[in-house]
Image (spheres, helix red, strand yellow):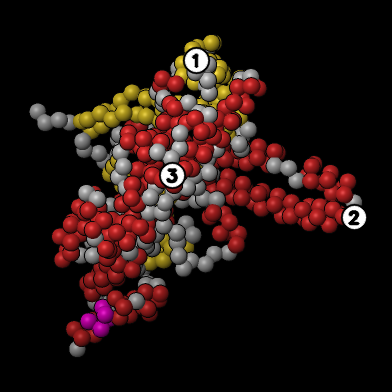
């Protein structure tokens, strides 16, 4: 019998706080983080150059040892080696992301079926590092890949052999971390619901003013069917996701985000007045100026409120992802919102709220639950997905708020309509993820013209009737289609 399913690992990063350590251990860890920050910065500068492209992370440490030795900073060799390896892995990931971005540019530069072989050859050169000999690809890679720099001074990486974990009580573990002196271990207490193992990162969280341990947790495996049902989702501001089946997930997200944004705006407006008063009184009444600075312009209370607001928003996003994918293996089509929206003027208040729209957190949360449930998330080109009538795939209609009104007067729920369009976009062979906005507009105008031709109308008639937005009349495709229809009618 043919194989019906496969299995995937469920892995996530767990963050546990450090709840106990002596002052001497804290000072040593902070000093070690500072020195390792120097190693991290110099490693990025050396290994991040184009000359070290594709370097094996296992060979990165000898390369760094040629100009920086552990003794020069008073560091153990192993701590320095683990840091350099971590940097090399991060650079490798950055290089892979740059190659992915260059592939998008290659598809834009050589579109259509006629350039299929050219695109295939270019992508093959990018994978085999032969792009060094191609002036075009070399220029695109250098433009996309910028040498990384690191200012991180709050992290130590430990491999399994660099620490020991011992259980003290039900949710408390003691970590014995490798110190600066041979044979000496720094003991810290952490609050965790499971034993810590594998590679860990000890991080000093400056916002929370505490030490944290980050490590990967394997939650077992999940059975993944080879055939998954497909679903489209529209990422929104008022609710996190709206799927193509008509269900909203993460209601109340917009209310929390707006509340957070408005509170920060009002707070900063008042702080600006206090800062002006503080500067004004510096020469007139220095004592009062100092009291204002100490008692009214601190960040401790504001940071606590910010963390609380952020936690509420993250809880809503996580619950939305769980509601959408929990317990189901799906093929999810979502918008690729990594590119900024250009030529879109908004009010200052709206721009401020959209800046607090946590698109990246929504994307990460969705991908996390997709990994846990065996789902696959495929991102599609988002242009015009909210301006298409999902019943006929044309640009005939208008969106106003939460409603989309078709040319025939039928009113659809706007987010549900957009989710259906995103689902259709996932299997659209004419519109790829790397298509430009102008290419998408041209394809949709041609489809709209064919649909109108079946009704005995033209694009000009649709504009006159108010079915088609007049902004499309400025495009070259609209003019060509209109001239072609006029020639046919003559």
Question: Which type of secondary structure does the marked residue at label 3 adopt?
Answer: helix
How far from the left and from the top, in percent, is residue 240? 46, 45
Q: Position of residue 280 (x, y in %)?
A: 83, 57
Q: Position of residue 364 (x, y in %)?
A: 42, 41
Residue for badge 1: 183
Residue pointed to by mark 2: 284
Q: CA distance from mark 3 to mark 2?
A: 49 Å
In front: label 3 or label 2 = 3
Real-space Cα distance between discs 1 and 2?
Answer: 59 Å
Q: Label 1 to label 3, Cα distance in Å?
A: 30 Å
Asked if one can make out residue 155 in the rendered structure from this viewpoint, the answer is: no
Element carrying mark 2: helix
Q: Earlier in the sequence, mark 1 or mark 3?
A: 3
Q: Is residue 446 visible?
A: yes
Instruction: Tell me the magenta residue range.
Output: 480-484
Q: Name the residue nearer the viewer: 26 or 305.
A: 26
Quadrant of the drawing holding the C terminus: bottom left
Q: CB under 8 Å between callouts 1 and 3?
A: no
Mark 2 crowdedness (10 Å alpha carbons): few <14, some 14-19, many ≥20: few
Q: Which secondary structure type mostly characterizes the magenta part of the structure?
A: helix
Q: Position of residue 221 (x, y in %)?
A: 30, 25
Q: Nearer the viewer, mark 1 or mark 2?
A: 1
- Which quarter of the image is occupied by the N terminus? top left
Which residue appears at 17% of the width and 31% of the height?
Answer: 4
Give the image quarter of residue 61: top left
Instruction: Give the residue displayed 38% in from the left and 66% down from the top.
Output: 397
Q: Which residue appears at 18% of the width and 64% of the height?
A: 115
Other residues around mark 3 within 10 Å, as few (<14) / some (14–19) / many (≥20): many
Q: Nearer the viewer, residue 145 or 421?
A: 145
Give the residue pinned by disc 3.
Answer: 44
């Amino acid at each position: 019998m043919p194989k019906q399913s496969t299995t995937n690992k469920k892995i996530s990063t767990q963050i546990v706080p450090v709840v106990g350590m002596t002052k001497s251990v804290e000072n040593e860890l902070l000093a070690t983080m500072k020195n390792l920050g120097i190693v991290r910065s110099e490693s990025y500068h050396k290994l991040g150059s184009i000359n070290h492209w594709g370097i094996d992370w296992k060979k990165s440490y000898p390369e760094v040892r040629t100009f920086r030795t552990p003794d020069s900073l008073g560091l153990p060799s192993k701590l320095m080696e683990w840091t350099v390896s971590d940097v090399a892995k991060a650079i490798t990931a950055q290089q892979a992301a740059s190659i992915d971005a260059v592939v998008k540019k290659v598809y834009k530069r050589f579109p259509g079926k006629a350039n299929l072989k050219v695109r295939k050859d270019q992508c093959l050169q990018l994978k085999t590092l032969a792009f060094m000999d191609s002036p075009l690809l070399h220029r695109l890679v250098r433009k996309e890949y910028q040498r990384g720099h690191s200012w991180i001074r709050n992290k130590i990486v430990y491999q399994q052999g660099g620490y020991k974990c011992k259980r003290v009580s039900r949710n408390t573990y003691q970590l014995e971390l490798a110190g600066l002196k041979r044979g000496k271990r720094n003991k810290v207490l952490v609050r965790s619901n499971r034993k810590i193992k594998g590679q860990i990162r000890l991080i000093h969280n400056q916002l929370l003013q505490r030490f944290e341990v980050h490590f990967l947790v394997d939650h077992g495996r999940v059975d993944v069917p080879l055939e998954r049902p497909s679903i489209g989702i529209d990422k929104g501001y008022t609710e996190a996701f709206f799927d193509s089946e008509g269900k909203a997930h993460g209601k109340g997200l917009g209310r929390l985000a707006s509340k957070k944004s408005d509170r920060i705006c009002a707070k900063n407006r008042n702080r600006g007045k206090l800062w002006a008063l503080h500067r004004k009184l510096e020469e007139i009444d220095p004592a009062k100026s100092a009291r204002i600075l100490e008692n009214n312009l601190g960040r401790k209370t504001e940071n606590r409120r910010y963390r609380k607001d952020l936690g509420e928003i993250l809880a809503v996003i996580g619950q939305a992802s769980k509601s959408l994918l929990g317990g189901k293996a799906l093929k999810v089509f979502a918008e690729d919102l990594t590119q900024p929206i250009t030529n879109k003027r908004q009010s200052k208040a709206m721009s401020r709220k959209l800046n607090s729209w946590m698109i990246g957190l929504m994307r990460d949360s969705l991908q996390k639950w997709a990994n846990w449930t065996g789902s696959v998330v495929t991102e599609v080109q988002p242009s015009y997905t909210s301006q298409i009538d999902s019943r006929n795939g044309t640009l005939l209609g208008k969106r106003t708020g939460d409603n989309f009104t078709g040319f025939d007067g039928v009113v659809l729920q706007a987010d549900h309509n957009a989710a259906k369009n995103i689902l259709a976009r996932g299997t659209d062979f004419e519109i790829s993820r790397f298509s430009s906005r102008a290419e998408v507009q041209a394809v949709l105008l041609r489809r709209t013209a064919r649909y109108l031709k079946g009704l005995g109308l033209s694009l000009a008639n649709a504009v006159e009737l108010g079915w088609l937005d007049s902004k499309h009349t400025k495009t070259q495709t609209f003019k060509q289609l209109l001239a072609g229809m006029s020639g046919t009618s003559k």
